[in-house]
Image (tube, helix red, strand yellow):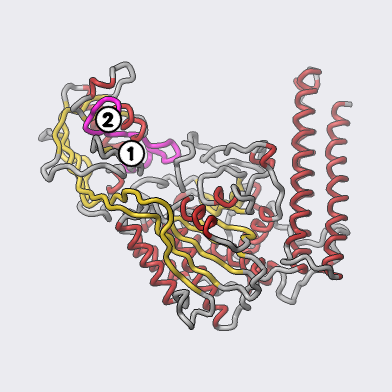
Amino acid sequence: MSVCCRMRTGRAVPSRTARSFFLGAILVLGGVVPASAVGQADGTSLSASMEAVQSAFEKDVAGKLLEGMDPFYRLRGNHGYLRSLELAMEALEKGGFSDPSSPDSHGDTVRFRDFGPVKPAWTPSSASLSVISPDVGLLHSFEDESGLDRTFVCANSFPTAPDGVVAPLVRFDHSKPPESYAGTIVYGTLPSAALFEQAVVQGGALGVISSYLPEYNEPSTYTDAIHFSKVPYDAEREGFGLNVSPAKRRVLERLLSGGMVYVRVIIGARFTEARSRTLIAKIDGSDSHAGTVVLVAHLDEPGTNDNGSGVAATVGMATGYLKAIREGRLPRPRRNIVFLIGTEFECSREWLRANSDKVDLAIVIDMVGEDPEENGALPLVERMPDPGAIWDRPPLDVHSEWGRGDVRVGQLSGNFLNDYVMAAMHERQKRVDWPVRSNPYEGGSDHESFLERGIPAVLLWHFTDPYYHTNLDRLDKVSLDEMENMAMGTLALVNHFGSAGLERADEVLRLVMEAARVRLGTEAKTARTRLSVQAVKDDPVQLALVSDRERTIIVAWSHWYREAVLSIEHFEPGFQSSEPRRILEANIDQALTELRKLERQALAVIDDQEG
């Protein structure tokens, strides 16, 4: 997951009380939808879909691919990136996908496409950082790109001469003029890119050494963790950036407090020129007019969880699902299913520009292998923007340590997808002990690309993982069982929606309405609690302010859910008139009536408290 959008601070473990939020989502809902309108034993339900895909994830394929990718330092277009794409391509071809020109493809194809501009692609080969001192010596090193300390060299650092660079190490000081750093190597606690800008670009330093490590990485516990980061590509200055672990930070600060320090930096790296290569696999739908479901995983970060796990899970889903179709264990979906693997943001945005097919929804697979018992990272479904992204209140809305996204009321557009995905994930939770929950929209991965175009999209991920964006995010931190949990929930939804028609639209209407009842009921209770605070009750100004805020939130949720209910009208491809469609439209009208009633009941709670 990209860190380009914003940094996150603080360490607050989100509440797990919301994990059962949607467990009752597929109950028959109080008079809104007749039970007979929804398929049950005929295989149309989410529960039946989950049962059908139980063997449709190839865990061994995912595990083998992940093991193959782990040694590579993957960045856009570099050696490790391209080699990892080749491994994914080999797995997909072995799993039954063919070149689009093959007469035996049956429309189930895989290919590479190069998107975007040509840019420098950086591959590290070896590096070391040493203190010129007989009692200290080597701090960090790696002999090839698979080395444990490989993230201590920032991406885009230029190589040195074979015997390296020896220079004085000076501490960064905001009060010093930048030109005072010329010819030195500058140490500081700022993130490496910020330090590089001030010391190298503005001051003429040879390079920088950063000890920055976010608090969610728990630097006091994981003292050997080294941050993964980049410095700007700068062919004019040919500088470098380095990161050090908390343990080595203490060594450098002790030495700097005692006087002059010299360090030797040796970097082996090479730049090549590359576009953004993207792997595109497609399972051809049986109805050319039915639309497309897209699954996306980015490849361009060196962590095994971030995002080797997303790539491996996506390939394991693609090969397993196609195999089940070819063997007759699952029907071919009506909709196309597309799997994208490439550079974060760029692969999805460029594919959308080049694609002419209608895209119904997207699921982004990013960091799905963290073991909650080992890493402490909860499995999360990041919802598309809803009022909880603006007014986040436990237990239903708990932001992760990634932090709040920039969402405005005018950007909210209700859709069935949030509750639909959570219902699918809870179908998996019924079968295994799994603490999955949702979080409000925060942004930072490929779901942004689809949302920008008005296409419903959610993110599947884990956070907060103390190994995230560090050298410690390697194969030993991955749980294939956790990847399987995320994959099963995803496949249940893809299989259900891939052939969705009016009977499945009725089911989704029921689960969305159940979620709406829980939401509006909870917001009413929250309003009552906040208006009951004595300091608010006794202060007319505060009472008015809190009342207005609570009304705004309730109305926003009611409006969002009315839009979500209306979005189900398009669940069935095409708009031909039919008796099932008329039944669905009548059920939607009943749901809208109920939502307005629930809104009035929630607002009446505020009226009572104002009294």
Please name the residue that numbered disc 2 is placed on. 200
Q: Which mark is residue 453?
A: none
- The amino acid sitting under disc 2 is Val
Determine whether, in the image, residue 209 is placed left or right of residue 563: left
In which image quadrant can residue 573 be found? bottom right
Q: Is residue 585 above or below residue 224?
A: below
Dot 1: what SS? Answer: loop
Q: Give the residues drawn in magenta, as a range.
A: 201-225
Of pointers 1 and 2, the one earlier in the residue sequence? 2
Could you classify mark 2 by the number of other residues whose Cα lies within 10 Å: few (under 14), some (14-19), or many (20 or more)? many
Q: Nearer the viewer, residue 268 or 227?
A: 268
Residue 231 bears which disc, if any?
Answer: 1
Q: Is residue 403 left or right of residue 41?
A: left
Could you tell me residue 408's position as x and y percent? 65, 36
Task: Please check the rendered image and state whether residue 103 is part of the magenta-colored stretch, yes or no.
Answer: no
Hey, what amino acid is under mark 1? Val
- Is 427 left or right of 222, judged from the image as shown? right
Q: CA distance from mark 1 to mark 2?
A: 10 Å
Give the side of residue 55 with respect to residue 198, left or right.
right
Q: Is residue 203 magenta?
A: yes
Q: Are marks 1 and 2 in contact (CB under 8 Å)?
A: yes
Q: Is residue 341 above or below residue 174?
A: below
Element on which disc 2 rests:
helix
**Residue at the image point whose x is 59% and y is 47% from the top:** 452
Q: Residues within 10 Å of mark 1 (few under 14, many from 20)?
A: many
Give the percent coordinates (x, y) of residue 219: 38, 38
Q: Position of residue 221 (x, y in %)?
A: 38, 40
Q: Which of the 4 image quarters holds residue 279?
A: bottom left
**Quadrant location of the C terminus in the rendered image:** top right
Nearer to the camera, 596 or 345: 345
